[in-house]
Image (cartoon, grey):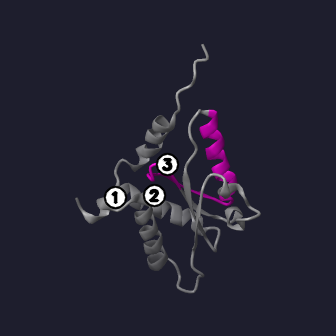
Amino acid sequence: MNSETSKNDAAIFDELVQQYATTYRHPDLPPFSSHQHDIVSIHDDVRYPEVLKPGVYALYDHEGTLFYIGESSSPSRRTYDHKRDACKNNQRPPQHIHLITVTEPWERFSLEQFLQSKFQSKFPNFRGRWDEWVKREAQPESNGE
C-alpha cells in the first residue's frame, strides 16, 4: 500500500488545499481559512459567520469518508439543501463538513475543480462515492404494520 492510500481522506484533502494555495495562488493574497463543522454548526451563522462566505466544502460520512466536494457563495444555504435532501430520502445527513473560505469569490470555482480532479486521480471511484453514500446512509423505513 502506498503512502497516499494509507492516509485518511481529511489529510489528503488538507494536503491538496495546501498544494493549490502554494502552487496556484498569488503570494499577496490572504491565506484561505479552514473551518470544521457538523450539520448543525454549518447553519449557525450567528456563531460561525464564515458559513455565509464563499468557499469550497467537503462532505464526510459517519465513517470519515469524503464523498462530495462542492462550492457555494453561501455554504450554509447549500449544505442545507444536502441536509434537506438526505432527510427527505430517509438518510442520515453528512456527519462532518470541512469548509475552506476564499478571499476572492471567483476562487471557489478554481479550487473546487482542482480538488475534484486531484481526488478523482487519487481515487478513480471518487465520483461513485456519492451513490455509495446514498445507498449506505439510507435507513430502512418502518413498515408500521
Q: Which mark is residue 116?
A: 2
Magenta stretch: includes residue 89: no
Q: Earlier in the sequence, mark 2 or mark 1?
A: 2
Q: Quadrant of the C terminus?
A: top right
Marks 2 and 3 sit apart, C-alpha to C-alpha, by 17 Å
Q: Is residue 78 above or below residue 30?
A: above
Looking at the image, the residue that sits furthest to the left is 1
Q: Of circles 3 and 1, which is in front? A: 3
Q: Are marks 2 and 3 in contact (CB under 8 Å)?
A: no
Q: Quadrant of the N terminus?
A: bottom left
Looking at the image, the residue that sits furthest to the top is 145
Helix, strand, or loop for circle 2?
A: helix
Q: Residue at x 61, y 71 (%)?
A: 102
The mark tally for this picture is 3
Helix, strand, or loop for circle 1?
A: helix
**What amino acid type should be assigned to the residue bearing mark 2?**
Gln
Judge the density around disc 2: few (<14), some (14-19), many (≥20) Cα neighbours within 10 Å: some
Looking at the image, the residue that sits furthest to the front is 145
Highlighted range, magenta? 59-88
Q: Which percent across, then down, holds residue 66?
A: 46, 53
Q: Which percent across, then down, holds residue 112?
A: 52, 61
Q: Which mark is residue 61?
A: 3
Q: Residue at x 63, y 37 (%)?
A: 87
Q: Which percent across, then down, holds residue 89?
A: 59, 33
